[in-house]
Image: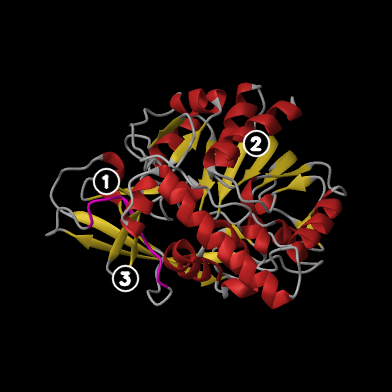
Amino acid sequence: MNYDYLIVGAGLFGAVFAREMKRRGKSVLVIDKRNTIAGNIYTEKRMDINVHKYGAHIFHTSDREVWDYVNDFAEFNNYINSPVAVYKDELYNLPFNMNTFSRMWGIKTPSEAMAIIKEQADKEISRMKSEKGTDSFTADNLEEQALSLAGRDIYEKLVKGYTEKQWGRDCKDLPAFIIKRLPMRYTYDNNYFNDRYQGIPIGGYTAMVEKILDGITVLTGCDYYEFVQLEDGAPKTPFTSVKGDTFGKILFTGMIDEFFGYRLGTLEYRSLRFETQDLPDVDNYQGNAVVNYTEREIPYTRIIEHKHFEYGTGKGTIITREYPATWNHGDEPYYPMNDDKNNALYARYKELAKEYPDVLFGGRLGQYKYYNMDQIVREALDMSRSEG
């Protein structure tokens, strides 16, 4: 069969792009190497709980068009992301706000919090300038950046260990740009996001993506590298499947360096490992959907209790411990390592991609960029419009 588009990846980007091109009268085929759709936002129902299999996903946006778009395919609840952080035997609200500061220093007013943070930050800046023998201060690494913004207490208890687990490196070995700023909220407000719209699709993300893909042919358990005819590691033109299907264009949402056979080198990622437990005899494990663990000595970064995303009240619960991991070939890539070295390599792959004008690259992996879900929807909508 002849298709206008082969869409590689049935995640959110691929699904939205497929839907929009079908609306424009184009024929599309979607393939995914997993046996499931929805990519990393896939949810599966167990014990009447929608489990976020690949980590917590909270949809939030200030883009009204994007919000209206996803609401065409799901009804969203009014979940507000209000994580808490555990440091030793202390419990803190996130993001950094007056509840956090009151717990940390026993204070009540914003002016008290501002004064303490300024005093601690100024002290750290003075110390670092003295050690460097300079009258001006520029952070040389993430630790210096965080200390200059938040002071010692917040850095040691809530930033240092968590960040080092996330990135697998000491904060002194991480670039300062990772933390461009540390938002301080001088109100008693535990809402993690500032966006106008926020929630979780009732019934889970998989059901939402199923509706987006309604009426579209999707092949799961289908590996792109085994499905299309390749020549020197790239798709043979005209684009043809091993079964003889032809495609006018390809949208590829996998790793761009893998698409080109790593011919320019390998881009770096961070990976994750998930350890999920069914607890049929426990109705409420931690009282919150997301609890971060900020000590480096505790190997996981957070525990997710899935039932709280949809205000579950039934018997039993399911939790997931999330462990950051070094990415190796064959592992699932989650976060691009957007440092100068990797960004320069990606720029070379992006230039190489110009030799294939009928191949589009989308999503975190195809564009080597961290995207929130609303940004993925926006990018897919914009790309579909540019295709006409």
Residue 307 percent across, percent down from the top left: 25, 47
Residue shown at the point (35%, 59%) measured from the top left: 104
Query: Is 364 placed above or below 278 here?
Result: above
Is 238 displayed left or right of 185 in the figure? right
Front-lying residue, 319 or 24: 319
Label 2 vs label 1: CA separation? 30 Å
Q: Tag 1: Cα neighbours inside 10 Å, few (<14), some, or many (≥20)?
A: many
Disc 2 residue type?
Glu
Amino acid carrying label 3: it is Lys
Q: Counting other residues with Cα less than 10 Å from the Cα at mark 3, is it few (<14), some (14-19), or many (20 or more)? A: few
Q: Amino acid at mark 1?
A: His
Helix, strand or loop at mark 3 = loop
Q: Position of residue 110 (x, y in %)?
A: 42, 43
On the image, the x and y values in percent for residue 196 come to 47, 29
Residue contact between numbered discs 3 and 1, judged by CB atoms under 8 Å: no
For residue 88, the mark is: 3
Q: Which callout, 2 or 1, points at the residue further toward the start of the chain?
A: 1
Spatial CA span between label 3 and label 1? 24 Å
Under tag 2, what secondary structure?
helix
Q: Which mark is residue 308?
A: 1
CA gap, disc 3 and disc 2: 41 Å
Residue ID at (67%, 44%): 362
Residue 222 badge: none
Task: Report the front residue among 244 and 12.
Answer: 12
Q: Nearer the viewer, mark 3 or mark 1?
A: 3
Which residue position is annotated with label 2?
Answer: 379
- The segment highlighted magenta reads 286-295
Give the residue at x 68% y 59%: 338
* Horizontal relation, residue 17 to residue 2: left or right: left
Judge whether residue 170 can be spotted in this image.
Answer: yes
Tell which of 289 and 30 is nearer to you: 289
Q: Earlier in the sequence, mark 3 or mark 2?
A: 3
